[in-house]
Image (spheres, rainbow, N blue to C red):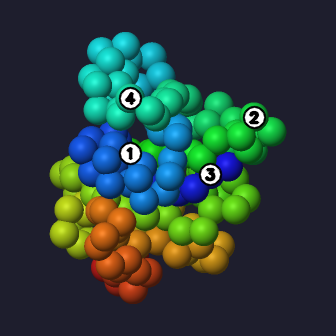
Amino acid sequence: MIKALHLDDRLIHGQVAISWTRFLDANVLLVINDAIVNDNTRKMALKMAVPPAVKYGFRSVEEGINFLNGPDSQKYHIMALVSDPQDAARVALSVPGIQRLTVGGVRKKAPCIADNLNLTGEDVQALLKVVDSGIPVGMLPTPSDKFVNLEASLRKASQSG
């Protein structure tokens, strides 16, 4: 079962590997990303950050959604990781049971919405679809941080862009 959907352009890194897996009692880190599925070098680099007792997987967005909706996912505690806001929206809107979308950071050449969060207009619209579906979207780099709801910032960004 999915324990968390987390948006972070770094995907698997120290905070995810240690803090998040412990907090969620996650035994699978599932990277959902169309580009990484076919990039053996990036997969190899990401695998190095996975703790020994945690399994990992790499799926395209469509395959990730199918897996999370399938019966095999129920035997795991899964932290699903996406690096792109539009992929996050596709997963959040296609997989029942997602309580919230947490954001660690998205750093790219785009307007700054919050600390460590740069989004294009398309990214903002994708995340607003998630919010409008009833799933809160907020900054939460680590589980010990306070969840900062991004709805107001996203709505403001959508009006200015």
Kind of residue sitting beneath label 2: Asp
For mark 3, does the 10 Å Cα neighbourhood hold few (<14), some (14 to 19), or many (20 or more) residues?
A: many
Residue at screen point 70% across, 62% down? 97
| Sequence-wise first label, 2 or 4 | 4
Residue 86: x and y, percent? 48, 51
Between 94 and 46, which is closer to the camera in this rendering?
46
| Mark 4 neighbour class, 10 Å CA radius: few under 14, some 14 to 19, many 20 or more | few
Residue for badge 1: 83
Picture coordinates of residue 62 (x, y %)? 64, 35
Of callouts 3 and 2, the N-terminal one? 3
The Cα atoms of the two marked residues, 1 and 2, are separated by 24 Å
Q: CA distance from mark 3 to mark 2?
A: 11 Å
Asked if residue 9 lies left or right of residue 72, the reply is left
Q: Determine which residue is flagged by label 4.
A: 52
Q: Report the residue that reaches farthest toward the right.
A: 71
Q: What is the three-letter code of the residue carrying label 3?
A: Ile
Tell me the distance, in whole angstroms, between the alpha carbons under discs 2 and 4: 21 Å
Q: From where the camera sits, is residue 131 visible?
A: yes
The residue indicated by pointer 2 is 72
> In screen coordinates, is 127 left or right of 19?
right
Q: Residue at x 22, y 52 (%)?
A: 107
Q: Earlier in the sequence, mark 1 or mark 2?
A: 2
The residue identified by callout 3 is 2
SS label for mark 1: loop
Relative to 110, say whether 47 is above or below.
above
Residue type, label 1: Ser
- What amino acid is at disc 4? Pro
Mark 2: secondary structure: helix
Give x and y (percent) for residue 120. Answer: 33, 59
The furthest residue to the top: 40
